[in-house]
Structure formats: structure tokens, C-alpha cells
Amino acid sequence: MRIKHLYYLVEIAKTKSITLSAEHLYISQQGLSQAIQKLEADLNVSLYRRCRKGVELTPAGNLALEKAKDVITKYEALISSMEPYINADSTISKDKLTISATPYMSNYLPHILDLFRKKHPDITIHIEEQKPNEIVTKLTQGCTDIGLVNLPDYYDLKHLKNSNVLFEKIRSYEFVVCVAKSSPLAKKTIFKKSEIKNHPLVVYKHEPYLEILTHMFGDLSQLDIIVKTNSYEVYLRTITHSKALAIMTHIDLTLFREKSVVAIPLKDTMRMDFGWFTSTNHPLSSAGLDFLEIYKTYLIKLPF
């Protein structure tokens, strides 16, 4: 039994979603499911079951949750109590890579982190979600090593020069309209922006995403938004079951791996530029450079 598996159980109990938990833990859904299966095998019980709203703990799972919290509390107390005795010359690696990421970048990190950890198992990675301008500030202050960003095409890059921050663009993706394959709208070849307000819409409840929609469509109260959610499962279900439209990039669509949804071009659309921020004042370590190479290779290999 591994301590981290107990942390996974606590997160699943909190979100009631494998998808959302995997996003928060920066691991793949498959990796999270396998970890919980291993924990179930160790305890010889079923810890959760699927339901309409996602997942819920079984009675055994609820008991395991309470015990897991106790173990985690004692484990963290143990770690804290050892800090005064840690030898500065210890052979244990203290190398750390600090990464700031715009909210949507966390969707692509699990696979990238898996590849990086295979090459650098001793590197501790700290990740924090922030807005682009906050990342620039962190880089300028030397508080983060890398900024992983996806920027709307209206983002002003001119101010980066004064901050000694560089932006390297890897790929660009246009926004499209996604509809259920079973919907009559799936036969359309292109959408005009003026047509969007005539159909129900599902959107993410993220400030940066809503800001992008505002730039695209103006006053969002004029749109027929029927669902605002941070859950991929609810988002997808609203498209496929409620026949709502969704506005996303091609790369977002690949995350669903869902054949029941099709993408239709949007006339006069916007694009998102994917890449990274780095500071010219704080050179990257070899591990940091390796991370960027893995990240770049991953993005380039994605479809579209």
C-alpha cells in the first residue's frame, strides 16, 4: 500500500469524479483508476461505485476514507518532525522544478509528467495554476522556473520585453463549434457567430474561458447558456444528451476522445497559441530544458 493512494482516495471523495480528481492530481484517468484498483486489492474491498453524478464511496470506502485521513495526518506530522534533522549534505535529491500553468494547461500535464518522471525520478515538481500576467510576475521574481501557457490571439506580448520574459509558441489552434453527431446541426459546414445565440450552449465556468467568449460574442447574457460547469463529464453529457453547442479548440476536443461529437468551423473565429514563458534572468536547469523538450514533442504530436 502506498501513501499517495490514500491521497487519491481523499481527492475522489472530495470531487466525486475520476476525471476531475485526475486533473487535480495531475495524473491520467487510467493511472488514477489503476491506483485505486491496487488500493482495493490491498484492502480486499470495493471502495467506490459509479452513479449518475459521477462516483460515490461504498460503506467500506467511507470507513477507509476516515482511516486514510488519520494515516495522512500522522504521516505528514512525521515528515514535519524530521525536518530539523535533515542533513544538508544528504544524498537525497532536493532538486525541484517549479511550474506555473494557465488553467487549461493542466489537462495536458498528466502524460507529460509521466514521461518526465521516467527520465528524472528524483526531481520534485511543484505546479500551480495562474493567469498569464501572474506567471510573468512569478518568473520576473524568480519564483517559478517555467510558465506553460495557452494564450488567446488578442493577448498583448509587448509587455514581456520589459519583464525579460520570452514566449515561445509551439502550436496554434482555432476555436470551433462542437455538436452531437446525432444532431441535425452536425450536417452544417460552418457556423456564423450570429447563429450561436439561436441554440443552447454549454460553457466552462472558468474566468479565462468566459473572457474569451466575451471577446468572441460580446455580452454573454445574449447567449442561451444552459449549463456552466467545470466538469468534463457534465460538459460532454450536455453536448451529447441535451444537444447543446460548445465552443472549444480542436485540441480540447482530442481530450474527449469521443466519437459522438463533431467539430464544425466557426467563421471569423479566434485562436489559442500554446507554448511557454521563460525568464532571461534565470537560466533553466538541464531538467527544466528536458521538461520543455518533452512538452514540445507532446504538443507537436497531437492531432490537428
Image (spheres, rainbow, N blue to C red):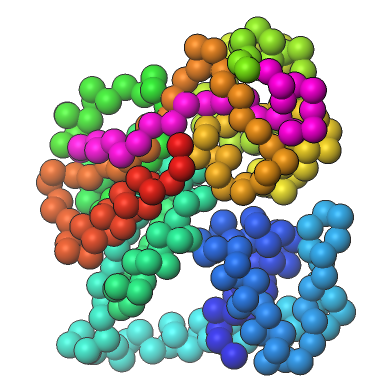
Is residue 19 toward the left or the right of residue 104 in the image?
Answer: right
The C terminus - image quarter? top left
Q: Quadrant of residue 139?
A: top left
Work out whether 85 lies above or below 63.
below
**Residue 247 at least partly seen:** no
Is residue 288 toward the left or the right of residue 176 in the image?
Answer: left
Which residue does the image show at 50% across and 39% down from the upper left?
251
Is residue 240 toward the left or the right of residue 303 in the image?
Answer: right
Q: Main secondary structure of the magenta part?
A: strand
Q: Nearer the viewer, residue 250 or 66?
A: 250
Q: Nearer the viewer, residue 169 or 7?
A: 169
Which residue does the image show at 79% across and 23% down from the upper left?
184
Is 179 contained in the magenta span?
yes
Which x, y percent locates residue 70?
66, 84
Q: Quadrant of residue 224?
A: top right
The N terminus - image quarter? bottom right
**Span of residues in magenta:** 165-188
Which x, y percent locates residue 89?
17, 87
Is 180 contained in the magenta span?
yes
**Residue 21 at least partly seen:** yes
Q: Nearer the viewer, residue 215 or 164?
A: 215
Which x, y percent locates residue 125?
36, 66
Q: Quadrant of residue 111?
A: bottom left
Which x, y percent locates residue 48?
79, 73
Which residue does the image show at 44% across and 85% down from the upper left?
79
Work out whether 16 lies above or below 108.
below
Q: Nearer the viewer, residue 277 or 19?
A: 19
Work out whether 256 lies above or below 208.
below
Which residue does the image show at 69% across and 37% down from the upper left?
261
